[in-house]
Amino acid sequence: MLIRLLSHSPFEKPRTERLICLETHLRQKSESTITLKHYLDWLEQANITIPTRRTLNEDLKRYANFCDDVRYGGDTKSLSLTPSATKDAITWFMGNAWLDAPLRPRLFSSCVRCLLLARELQSEVDFPYNPLRKPGQSWIPQTAKGIPLRLIPGADSGYMQLWREWGGKSIFNLARIPKYVCFTGNSAQHYAPLQTEQFVLITVKSDDRFILERLKKQFPNFVVEERQRVILQIEKSLALMTTEMLKAHLARTQNLARNIPIKQKIGNATLYYEELKEDPKS
């Protein structure tokens, strides 16, 4: 997603240095438009050797080809971020297979790149956020602010944990950020120290030793405590996502997912499953 995070850059070393400088300035907003003059000024401020104008134009063209959310060209030769692009973010968080998945999440690449840069620079960001509506309450949009700390693996989306000003941590579903993220210009200097996080223990018991063996082989962080039990110690903030993925794994590897009922009650929702005789696209 960010050139600075790649173990091997697709560009030669001088161009990589210049494009990292470009990203550091450009990615402080998820919506932005710049010209070659902006790029030139940023390179001069960073004391980076300035190549020919043709090479600078090639830098921007190559960067646009590298990123799904960048457009470069036109009469003004401006470079713009397109906040509706999602391909790179979905691939980076979920994998290529999710690009064709029926439940493809809405993850905006320009938002994710801004958040990743803020995490690397330990900078504060703010963004509008669409929280889940609580039962019996009206829906109210929110604005979130914090310093990105870590990525949280999820089965349905990309999640990020933010350090909040009072010292706590919050997890945000990136699919609920409506396209706009921006640096505030603040750092962690005025933040309260991070609160110590509680750990929890996830235990899986089974009389079937093959289930536990498969679990241990696929997820090596599980520890065999007894013959019929394995345990996993994790931070409390990871518990919900981890148990969701673990339940899905156990159901799938025991072929339980094939027994989907025609009608299934899930909380306040009802899931209906029906096999179609014809392809609706035909």
Image (cartoon, helix red, strand yellow):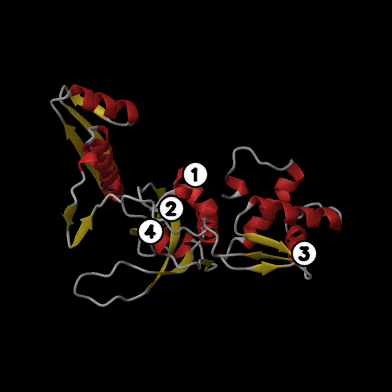
Mark 3 Cα within 10 Å, few/some/many (few <14, many 20+)? some
Q: Earlier in the sequence, mark 1 or mark 4?
A: 1
Q: Disc 3 vs disc 2: Cβ atoms closer than 8 Å?
A: no
In the rendered image, which residue does mark 1 sit on? 96
Q: Nearer the viewer, mark 1 or mark 4?
A: 1
Q: Number of callouts in the render?
A: 4
Instruction: Find the distance from the CA under tag 1 to the CA under tag 3.
Output: 33 Å
> Residue 36: which numbered mark, if any?
3
Instruction: Find the distance from the CA under tag 1 to the CA under tag 4.
Output: 20 Å
In the rendered image, which residue does mark 4 sit on? 173
Horizontal side, residue 17 vs residue 110: left or right: right
Q: Position of residue 125 (x, y in %)?
A: 49, 65
Mark 3 is on which residue type?
Leu
259 vs 185: above or below: above
Residue located 39% across and 51% down the image: 279
Horizontal side, residue 48 vs residue 197: left or right: right
Comparing 151 with 244, the one in front is 244
In this orientation, does residue 235 appear?
no
Q: Disc 1 vs disc 4: Cβ atoms closer than 8 Å?
A: no
The quadrant of the image that shows the C terminus is bottom left
Mark 4 is on which residue type?
Asn
Instruction: Find the distance from the CA under tag 3 to the CA under tag 2.
Output: 33 Å
Which of the 4 image quarters holds residue 121? Answer: bottom right
> Residue 149: which numbered mark, if any?
2
Mark 1 is on which residue type?
Asn
Residue located 50% across and 54% down the image: 119
Q: Earlier in the sequence, mark 4 or mark 2?
A: 2
Q: Nearer the viewer, mark 1 or mark 3?
A: 1
Q: Earlier in the sequence, mark 4 or mark 3?
A: 3
262 vs 231: above or below: below
